Image: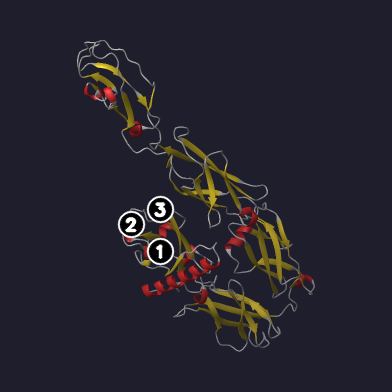
Amino acid sequence: MGERGQRLRVNCWCVAGILLLCFGKRICAQLRYSVPEEVQVGSPVGNVAKDLGLDLSTLKDRRFRIVSGPNHALFLLNQNTGVLYIGKITDREELCDGIKVCLINLKIVVESPLEIHYVGVEITDVNDHSPTFPESEQRLEIAEHTPPGTRFQIHAARDPDVGTQSVRLYRLSSNEFFDIEIRDSEEDKIPFLVIKKPLDREQRAEHRLVLTALDGGSPSKSGSLNLTITVLDANDNRPVFSKDIYTVSLNENAPIGTLVLQLNASDLDDGSNSEIEYMFGKTQKKKVHDTFELDSVTGEIRVKGTVDFEDTEMYRLDLQASDKGQPPWTAESRVVIKIKDVNDNQPNIEVTSLSNVVPEDSKPGTVISLISVTDRDSGVNGKVICKILDNVPFDLTPSIEENMYSLVTKGRLDREIVSHYDITITATDCGEPPLSTVKTLSVQVSDVNDNRPLFSQDPFELYLEENNAPGASIFSVSAADNDLNENAAIAYHIVRGDGQHRDVTSFLNVNSDNGHISALKGFDFETLKTFQFQVVARPQILELRH
């Protein structure tokens, strides 16, 4: 898709997102792009920064990036231009086998202030596969005088491509006895060979045909299957299943050997012509064979491998019942197995961004980090309740998006009382029994200049002998500050007095750093018997927060 086409799609989607936000506040707007599979590394997908309205000049400083995820390596972000581009050649069939819409979800983060944006990139299909049959040849044995209209299932062709580029139609080589019919299933098109006119083994004992499968690409790709039909005399009744479609439910994690279903087919013939053998359809997927086993005699379907709801929610089994006549008759049926979820996954707590240092003067509601909680289970088993266990001045605030929380301050912080918090967050699902996950976050409270210096004694009373040596230290004062580092640094000075002692600074001096007081001249008892002065201790950082 060209740059203009991508831009049009993004703009249309963004408008839709705005409308959704207007009419439903709980829906979060996202960007969505579309790019074909197998495009070259370095190909642009879209300008995320521009479409989000971000200032390009701040992208590096704000650490514009993709948050790590299962598919984050497929794409890269240019912090200079804001362009999202291909970081690895994508194969849609490898990423999203069997999924109609292959959507890769990316989480984009910028900081200062912290923002999280969600970007979806749809990997669109290209016609890079041809239809293929499981075998190059299929042999059928059909009794002569089989009524016209009788159908026989043929191997279905598979094409990993999706939509119109998967298998669209089948063509049978020209002949007067057979035609081809297609049954559309949820996953594929299954061909059936249909008799147009009665067969006569004495006139022609064998028919060789070619079945061609074509996809809907442009140009179309194809694959072929050689059909050999041998006309025999035998059996005139086919087996019949008790149901065309069986539907059953099965708990995930069911033990190996668990009985899922017992098939029941009958045949009106006698002897070996009525003895029935059960089997999986020829085109059954390998995953079905790995998970279930079928008893060919009893028709019992039992668990063979691991059953995991989070891996597969539903299985579709194509089955056949064949009698032992010559030639054998075959009937088809389908079993739909719905897997029921059980609470077997613990919630997962993810800290998207954490500021582990918070100033003690932070206002209530200050965001410390964003917490996302996920649970692979579904329904009530996947619903998660998140809370803080300890009595700490922090709280979890739910976000608009489900299972997203903001860790915020609650109440006043005081470093001089508590300088460090370990915040324990627990996430518990609503399953029965519930499963929990605990995560501990460490937060350090940083100091601000919110304490005044205090003298250990006030007032001080000092006795001096007259005729002291000028310049000698006569006394020392000391004050303390509960703040840290530069916030606790103190400067001392003498306040100029009033009245007869207003010139006290002319004969006294204080060291501003250590509070040592020295006399600049000698004292004479007969001239001056007593005097008062005031020393002030103040922070070297004059700004004092309250």
* CB-based contact (under 8 Å), mark 2 and mark 1: no
- Classify residue 197 by image quadrant: bottom right
Residue underneath mark 2? 58
Residue type highlighted by circle 2? Thr
Residue placed at 25% from the left, 11% from the top?
Answer: 525
Q: Quadrant of the C terminus?
A: top left
Secondary structure of the residue carrying tag 1 is helix
What residue does disc 3 label?
113
Q: Is residue 129 above or below residue 442?
A: below
Query: Considering only vertical position in the picture, is 480 above or below 254?
Result: above
How far apart in space, not on screen, are marks 2 and 1 (Cα)? Answer: 13 Å
Q: Quadrant of residue 249?
A: bottom right
Instruction: Tell me, for residue 460, which label it has, or none.
Output: none
Q: Residue at x 50, y 74 (%)?
A: 131
Amino acid type of disc 3?
Pro
In which image quadrant can residue 307 be found? Answer: bottom right
Q: Secondary structure at mark 2?
A: helix
